[in-house]
Image (cartoon, rainbow, N blue to C red):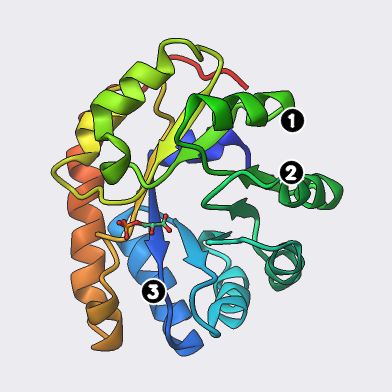
Amino acid sequence: MVTPETLGRHRLVPVVVLDEAESAAPLADALVEGGLPIAEVTFRTPAAAAAIARMAAHGGVTVGAGTVITVEQVDAAVEAGARFIVSPGFSPAIVRRCRELGVFVLPGATTATEIMAALEAGISVLKFFPAGSSGGVSALSALSAPFGQVSFVPTGGIDAASAPDYLALPSVLAVGGSWMVPRAAMAAGDFGLIADLVAASVQTTSATPTPPEWPG
Ligand code: 3PG
């Protein structure tokens, strides 16, 4: 079962926009080759559910669904084989459905009010999205102070250069982003480039110390 510790072990989550479900298997191979066998496949293209199914069938990668904004998408994602659900915001209905289906859910929040609403719903691991334009590392650091029981997965506007700064915050479990899997490289079928970008990011971030334990 995917748990917060799964994300914390990898520390990076590639966020993928797949235009062609046929790209899913070679992408999974590239992620494995790059040393990061996990992916968040976003519901931003019609190919999302089919791509999740192919990645789940691949077997070597922990696949989740991202940009999940409706309960119907939760159902479609889980049916396709998604093992975790990421949402850009906090929706009690989505959280409820994920619990019913027994799948780990990572909802988004960027304000103290949203974080408190999530805490009231029993959620203590949150996506911080869009991280870059919501104040970046300094905003997340300030928000972490009153919410010591919350772990964050910042995503949005992060790249290989800024990821270590986020990962250095004790409240940060993992960092997500699309910089490792450029849509153009996928369209060109350049999976070698993707494997190289993933490997470089794994290398850069592996030097960042891992917090001893995470709440929740
Ligand atoms: C997401 O869905 O988590 C983000 O859109 C990824 O953001 P990025 O493309 O800026 O990395």
The CA span between labels 1 and 2 is: 7 Å
| Residue type for callout 1 | Ala
Circle 3 residue: 27
Q: Secondary structure at mark 1?
A: loop
| Residue type for callout 2 | Pro
Circle 2 residue: 92
Q: Residue furthest right?
A: 100
Residue 193's tag is none
Q: Is residue 180 left or right of residue 146?
A: left
Picture residue at 62% right of the left edge, 61% below the top: 69
- Residue 170 in view: no
Q: Residue furthest left?
A: 161
Q: Which part of the image, by quadrant, shows the C terminus?
A: top right
Residue 121's tag is 1
Q: Position of residue 159 (x, y in %)?
A: 20, 50
Q: Secondary structure at mark 2?
A: helix
> Callout 1: 10 Å neighbours few (<14), some, many (20+)?
some
Picture residue at 42% right of the left edge, 85% below the top: 19
The CA span between labels 3 and 2 is: 32 Å
